[in-house]
Amino acid sequence: MAELSDKAREEFFSEAQEIIETLSRNLLSLDQNIKAGLTDPSLINEAFRAVHTLKGLAGLFGAVRLGALSHRLEDVLDDLRLGRIDLGQDVLDVLFGSVDAYTRILQSEKSGSDEELDVEHLFGELERIAASATVPESPVAGYDLDPGLLAVLTEYEEHRLRANIDLEMQLYRLRVQFDLATIDKVLEQLKERAKRHGEIITYLPTGEATSADTIELDLLMASRDDLATLIGSFAADHVVIEEIPRRARRTVTPGTLLPRAATSVGHPERDAKLPERGGLEQATSLRSLTQTVRVDIRKLDHLMNIVGELAIVRSALGRVSEKLRADGQRKLAAELQRLHRNFDRRLGEMQDGILEVRMVPLGQVFDRLARVVRQISREVGKEIRLVITGAETEIDKLIVEELSDPLMHMIRNAIDHGIEQGQRRVEVGKPLAGTIALNAFQKGNHVMIEVEDDGRGIDLPSLVEKAITLGKLTRSEAEELSRDETMALIFLPGLSTRASAGDVSGRGVGMDIVKTNISKLGGVIDVHSEGGIGTKVAITLPITLAIVSALLIQAGRHTLAIPLASVSEAIAFDEGAVRLVDGREVITLRGQTLPLCRLGRLMALESESDSMLRRRFVVVAALGQRRLGLVVDFLYGQEDIVIKPLGKSLAGVRGFAGATELGDQRVGLVLDAAGLIEEVLTGVDAPRSLERAGG
Amino acid sequence: MVDLTQSTASRLARRVGDRGPVREFLMFALAGDLYGLELTRIKEILSPPPITMVPRAPAAIVGVCSVRGLLVSVLDLRRKLRLVERPLTRRARILLGAAESGEVMGLLVDEVRHVVRLSAGEVEPAAAALGGDVSEFVLGIGRPAGEFLILLDLLSLVSS
């Protein structure tokens, strides 16, 4: 790739990425449409435009491989939109292959590697498809159309004209005077209005303007509505509408008159409804493009850091006003107090604003997953129906990026191990197509994502067998496992429920890795499964990683922060209420047993002797169903903090999510509640062997 | 913070010999001995801000501190080099340098002296006599104007 400034490169990559994602979305919609027996010409058009833009971009940036692929793909899409190729699953497969190839090429360009990517096969396929294009016979118009007009139609317009005639649409000529100053806008409005009735195929100046400031156009429009309806609809626009009469039609069989046109775009009766929708979408996407800026997430991090530092300034201001009051300067103190409150409010708004910018809909990653589902289901020959809900649920951009791999593993597992082969499904009375539901929704400060399948469920006995074979568990330990504990075996490294490791994807794409990745994001993962009915894997994630409300506590001489999202309550600690269950300290809280963890002891922050003297507290950390009482020395109260990750040199240190500035230059560690619960409770919930295996 | 360019200039006069390419080292004291780190590797010299101990961290890491919003892990060079530990004095400084991973780390030293320029001929290869387990961090021995300077390799110090 040509030498470029970093900024230009970034721009190029993010724009290319965006276009490829658009393309992928279009192809998915096309796929769905074909399955539903629909066709929407605007989707192929959009795909064509996306690839065309990408080709231009590739040329501009000297990305040769990207250009070569775009060039071939553009040919195929052009043939498709002009109806010279039928859009079938085989063609769609190759198109999806191109999206994957784009992604690989882009990654390789980004990492600056010149490694050979195997795209020859794909190129061959694309060329084969392009070569199969048949040029339709020249249209013999069944309408009394102006030959001058026909002569200047572009190939695409000609195709649309044929398609519309084949749909038995009536053709109209609309003659309109436009003011030169506003023609763009007015014409757009007119087109928009026309979509309710059909589609404007082309327009040509008539050359008969009444004044120098106006221009007169003839619009060729196809519509299923009659003349009176159209006149009624366009009356306000001073449009003169004429019906273009049919010539003696049907003297030639429709097949030869209008070859292939309709078949290329699918079923005519449905097609007629679609241009309207496609057109609207197009208009919306154009608008949003002009109002969007792309921002590097690091710049937002930087802004967030500044907000964090401003928060420290705010606290200092608060102290100054307190001091003034104490010194008897009441008036000045009150004034400063007012400013302080105002500052506080604005800062809060700014923080919310920045957080909002960081939020992206989960749909971004769901789109990619839909592609994966399609690909895998075809690889393994299982029919899959993917049902997505809550794609609009928003979450921090950083989390979205980190989510795509774990979710992909989960979906792969669901297809490979969950959904049965079609024949088997029919035998047990399930629909032939397996369903995978991808659900997302917000729950307080968390986002829940569920991957649910209606497959065979997790085979618990064979899971146990496998764990025993792998030496993670003895047979006697296995017998003592509760159902939940057995289910948790799935998160042990190296466990796969399939007996054979030979099947397509599946050496059990480690659920242990999935779990690790989710924990890194401060999330927890739970599995529910019913034999023969299905499996649901649920992930609970914090909405953002950037700024969090935290409870500041003291343990030993340390000031620590616990994210409030994982705190359910804090109570006074009564040493006398502690009981020992299975060698572990617990207390009873509203009838429920709460395991305890003496934070100071766990972290070796203090000696036992000085801790006995003080009045202490229990902070109840809760994530999902799991709760843990952290015994701490003091509660300072709540504060918004910016969590900064510990450096790589401390990467191996467990129990902390990072650190934060406490003001007066001090740094406080932020507890990783999910990690702590995991660490402490593995000994309670699961047998000791699990601890050994996980530890 | 010490202004490095100025001290460099003042040391120019002390330049010794002209054998081979000249490298600049920052001289500092640790448990009574003098050490040197290549100047280009050092980003900044700070008076130690409050350092927060990190439980469960590797022994040589005393904790983390914030340098203008940047979180920095601080390595105690005495611990790292297995020297006798002693409480910090007000002369203690933190040297900032980048590890191979790009992470900025702080090195806690007793006292910063000045910058010396050494030509290749003035640097002896590391003597095995220094002891097996720390010799991996030692680039060599420098002998500017009668002084004895143990030259350390910053990258291997902060990356291991």
Image (spheres, rainbow, N blue to C red):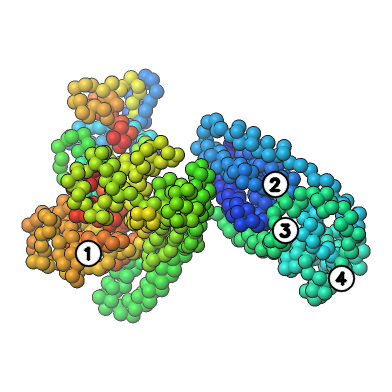
> What amino acid is at disc 3?
Pro
Measuring from the top left, give residue B11's x and y in whole percent.
34, 32
Measuring from the top left, give residue A314's x and y in whole percent.
36, 66
Residue tagged 3: A268
Badge 1 crowding class, 10 Å Cα cut-off, few under 14, some 14 to 19, many 20 or more, is many
* Callouts 3 and 2 in the same chain: yes
Q: What is the residue that sits farthest to the front in this orientation?
A: A427
Of A112 and A305, nearer the camera is A112
* Callouts 3 and 1 in the same chain: yes
> Mark 2 belongs to which subunit?
A
> What amino acid is at disc 4?
Val
- Separation (CA) of disc 4 from disc 3: 29 Å
The quadrant the N terminus of chain A occupies is top right
In the visual, does A531 lie left or right of A690?
Answer: right
Residue tagged 1: A619
* Callouts 2 and 1 in the same chain: yes
Residue tagged 4: A240
Q: Earlier in the sequence, mark 2 or mark 1?
A: 2
* Foreground label between 3 and 1: 3
